[in-house]
Image (cartoon, grey):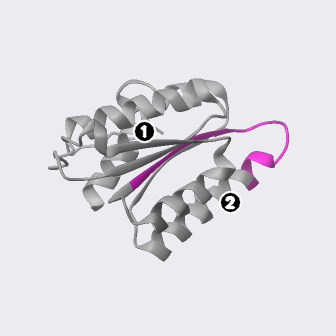
Amino acid sequence: MKRTQTKKNSLVKGDKLKIAIVVSRFNEDITENLLLGARETLKKNKVKEANINVVYVPGAFEIPLACERLARAGEYNGIVALGCVIRGETDHDFHIAAAVVRGIMDVILSYSMPVGFGVLTTQNLKQAQARSRGRHNKGKEAAQAVLEII
């Protein structure tokens, strides 16, 4: 069942914020759309382009390590994690998604660092495409979540 958000996201004064975005290259056609959405939200909230650092990792499994290193560096106010895990013929997707969620949560709690969760976990490519485009772009939502928690 599709739910709609009833409250509009308020703008955040982001001109002094430094945000890192970790993006998985696996399923790049999906993750690049998520990245575009995240950048759009950050810019709309006045985060300067020079204060947005995009870090690419091979796949979703590597996202938590990149987030941990960025959080440990202490240079950022928040991190946006973007990736895409699509169900296949085995349980591999379940194990990868669970590890990514746990790893990101560890970073959030260990460093008290806001990390926007924009890692799609879908049953198929069609679902991933729908969640990476237009007003349902989960990259936008992950970036907005980071800004609001900061």
- Which residue is depicted at the point 67% across and 34% down? 26
Q: Is residue 59 magenta?
A: no
Left or right relative to 13: residue 61: right
Q: Secondary structure at mark 1?
A: helix
Q: Is residue 39 above or below residue 97?
A: above
Mark 2: amino acid: Ala
- Which residue is depicted at the point 38% across and 32% down? 37
**Residue 35 percent coordinates (x, y):** 45, 33
Residue 122 sits in quarter? top right
Q: Residue furthest bottom?
A: 110
Q: In the depicted view, which residue is nearer to us: 7 or 100?
A: 100
**Separation of marks 2 and 1 at Cα, in angstroms:** 20 Å
Q: Residue furthest right?
A: 90
In the rendered structure, which segment of residues is drawn in magenta?
A: 79-95
Mark 1: amino acid: Gly
**Residue 80 percent coordinates (x, y):** 43, 49
Q: Find residue 139 and name its label.
A: 1
Q: Secondary structure at mark 2?
A: helix
Q: In the depicted view, which residue is nearer to us: 96 or 13?
A: 13
**Residue 118 percent coordinates (x, y):** 48, 45
Label 1 Cα neighbours within 10 Å, binned few <14 / some 14-19 / many ≥20: many
Residue 45 sits in quarter? top left
Which of the two discs, 2 and 1, labels the residue nearer the N terminus? 2
Label 2 Cα neighbours within 10 Å, binned few <14 / some 14-19 / many ≥20: some
Q: Find residue 99 and name its label.
A: 2
- Which residue is depicted at the point 38% across and 24% down? 134
Left or right relative to 45: residue 77: right
Left or right relative to 91: residue 105: left
Residue 52 sits in quarter? top left
- Which residue is depicted at the point 54% across and 32% down? 31
Tell me, yes or no, whether the two marked residues, 2 and 1, touch with CB atoms within 8 Å: no
